[in-house]
Amino acid sequence: MGHWCRICRNIKPNEKFSGKGHKNHICRDCSRKPKEEIEEIEHKDEIFNYLKQSNISKKNISRLQNLVCSHNKQVAEMAEIVLEIALIKPHKKRRLKFLAKENRELLSKLEKTGLIMAHRWENSNVCTILAAY
């Protein structure tokens, strides 16, 4: 059956995990990667998951403010975009339609970074929403 590695996103046999790797869901190959690379992947997943939530809470907003100060430029940029969205429209319901009406440039930033896929919309649906408004 195996285990799922949260860094490389693969299911690998039990032999590919060390004792700590089982608990942390990190395979031996990924645990050898530099710490900065692992943290980058984890931070990007965290930011992506904020958009999947039905509500971005105040605690999430404070965490995003910490991630905006990250040394990694990509993580900081993604966190800044999600923070801006959280301040404008923290609830997920009709978020994309609201951004299409009120803040198109923020929606285009979301699309450029790939964060728009957190809403499970395909690009054609996003284009349809943009065309409607």
Image (spheres, grey):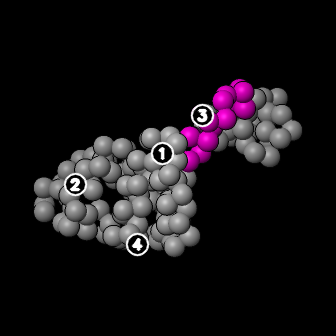
The residue lying toward the viewer, choosing from 16 and 26, is 26
**Residue at position x 25%, y 50% in the image:** 108
Name the residue tied to disc 2: 105
Mark 1 is surrounded, within 10 Å at the Cα level, by few (under 14), some (14 to 19) or many (20 or more) other residues, namely many
For badge 1, the amino acid type reads Val
Relative horizontal placement of residue 52, taking residue 35 as reference (left or right)? left
Q: Residue 115: x, y in percent?
A: 39, 49
Q: Name the residue under label 4.
A: 91
Q: What element carries label 3?
A: helix
Q: Earlier in the sequence, mark 1 or mark 2?
A: 1
- Image spot of residue 6 (x, y percent): 64, 42
Q: Which mark is residue 75?
A: 1
Q: Rounded to the nearest whole Å, what is the CA distance between mark 4 and mark 2?
A: 19 Å
Residue 53 visible in this rendered orientation of the protein? yes
Question: Residue 73 appears at what percent x and percent y?
Answer: 45, 41
Taking depth in this image into account, of 93 and 66 the one nearest to the observer is 66
Q: In x, y percent, where is residue 42? A: 59, 45
- Residue 100 position (above or below residue 21): below
Residue 48 appears anywhere in the view: no
The residue under the point 25% across, 63% down is 99
Judge by depth and name the residue closer to the eye, 5 or 42: 42
Q: Kindly identify the amino acid type of the residue bearing the numbered disc 3.
A: Glu
| Magenta residue check for 30 | yes
Q: What is the magenta segment's predominant secondary structure?
A: helix
- Whichever of labels 4 and 2 marks the residue nearer the N terminus, that label is 4
Q: What element carries label 1?
A: helix
Pointer 3 residue: 37
